[in-house]
Amino acid sequence: MRNLRVDGDRLWASLMEMGEIGETEKGGSCRLALTDLDKEGRDLFVRWCEEAGCTVTWDDMGNIFARRPGRDPNRAPIACGSHLDTQPKGGKFDGVYGVLAGLEVIRSLNDMEIETDAPIEVSVWTNEEGARFAPSMIGSGVFQGTYSTEYAHGTADLDGLTLGDELARIGYLGKEKCGDRTFGAFFEAHIEQGPILEAEGKTIGVVTGGQGLGWYDVTVTGQDSHAGTTPMTVRRDAMMAAARLCLSVEAIAVKYGPQGVATVGQLVVSPNSRNTVPGEVTFTVDMRHPDIEMLKGMDAELHAAVDAERLKEIVSVEMERVAYEMPMIFDEACVDAVRDAAESCGYSHRDIASGAGHDACFLSHILPVGMIFVPCADGISHNETEAATPEDLAAGCEVLLRAMLSRAVDEA
Ligand code: GLV
Ligand code: MN
Ligand code: MN
């Protein structure tokens, strides 16, 4: 297609401006889903999209859709997007890049006065990170049909505040039923969040699919007692039982390595006092593997470790699996569209599987989906210091533009 370009400086400036909302000490962002800061980020995005001439709506999961009309209003839009929520100590790029690259596509189409046949949409998906409400990717998960809206609205954060109430509080509980719209294709641009592209000196990752994951909430209940007077032989120490289970989680990942990974990222100790034997500990487990049979094996071994702890009859252990997502393969034509776009721009590229979860992963079960990765410094993400270069981000955005146009313009 003719000379297509995006404005990398404008994309960078928008990323930096969004990153100031909830900016952290080390230059990252903290915009947990549905907090006042998330609302501020959403409001800024909505304003930018309206200024770019889009019609902006949101559904009853708070997923936002900004539409640039096409010649044929009856055609399913060609969509892109990602998320604006972050980890508690997140970076400026995870998710935000995919959203603002989409906005840059729209701004660039406006600059170049390109009319598409299908409408173009940029979307923001609610609670992708899962850092405040579990499970993660809940907005796209409801859209795709894995979770019901009622279930999602009822999920609560550590303070007992529910997702539904928080959506209403910040003004993003829309009237449209989540899932009541469709797309002709969906593309998500994202930083890689791993070290491969940087190590190989490649600019673009052509994402072929994603790995499966299991998320679990574990509650270990023993008995609070005095740290100085309770003999070791009679303690019902929830923390020590939790510690043994955490080591089992690590051992399972090592056994299923190098592709298997597992993490205990959240742990709450009660009463959390230095001289009381803890009576209750809750913690989370995140286990992932690209092979479904291996993931099932990890799941079975985690259950076995919990059963072994129960058999000791020192504490009781409850475990709930809150997410279980199968590995997925993206649509061949969309993957090809991303590869062709990278090729036509002259960017070095390689096929790559995603280690992280993305909204595109859920959407891939119901839509043709493709993803574009760009390198990030040292492969570090979910970290305030997460970094990517303006040049790589602009390159990924250009690939996004071309991949979307290949589906949205008939003669493209
Ligand atoms: C999303 O950030 C994930 O957990 O992969
Ligand atoms: Mn992300
Ligand atoms: Mn993330």
Image (spheres, grey):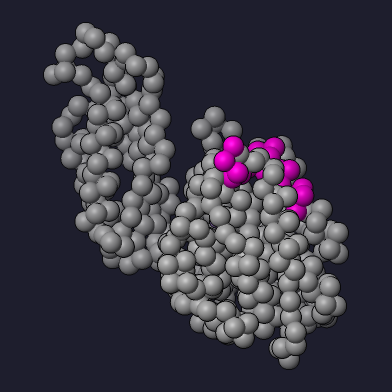
Q: Nearer the viewer, residue 275 or 125?
A: 275
- Residue drawn at x 28%, y 27% as measured from the top left: 238
Q: Locate residue 89, reporting x and y percent.
A: 54, 41
Residue 395 in sight in this render: yes
The answer to whether residue 253 is magenta is no
Left-right relation of 387 to 249? right
Q: Nearer the viewer, residue 262 or 160?
A: 262
Q: Nearer the viewer, residue 186 or 377?
A: 377
Left-right relation of 129 to 299? right
Left-right relation of 11 to 265? right
Q: Locate residue 291, reporting x and y percent.
A: 32, 67
Q: Locate residue 5, reporting x and y percent.
A: 73, 76
Which residue appears farthest toward the left when viewing the image? Answer: 233
Q: Is residue 235 above or below residue 41?
A: above
Q: Locate residue 280, reporting x and y percent.
A: 34, 25
- Residue drawn at x 70%, y 80% as measured from the top left: 405
Query: Which quadrant of the rendered structure holds the N terminus?
Result: bottom right
Q: Nearer the viewer, residue 288 or 8?
A: 8
Q: Is residue 40 above or below residue 270?
A: below
Residue 133 in sight in this render: no
Left-right relation of 278 to 363? left
- Residue drawn at x 62%, y 86% as measured from the top left: 344
Which residue appears farthest toward the bottom when viewing the image? Answer: 411
The answer to whether residue 33 is magenta is yes
Region rendered in magenta: 25-45
Q: Quadrant of residue 221?
A: top left
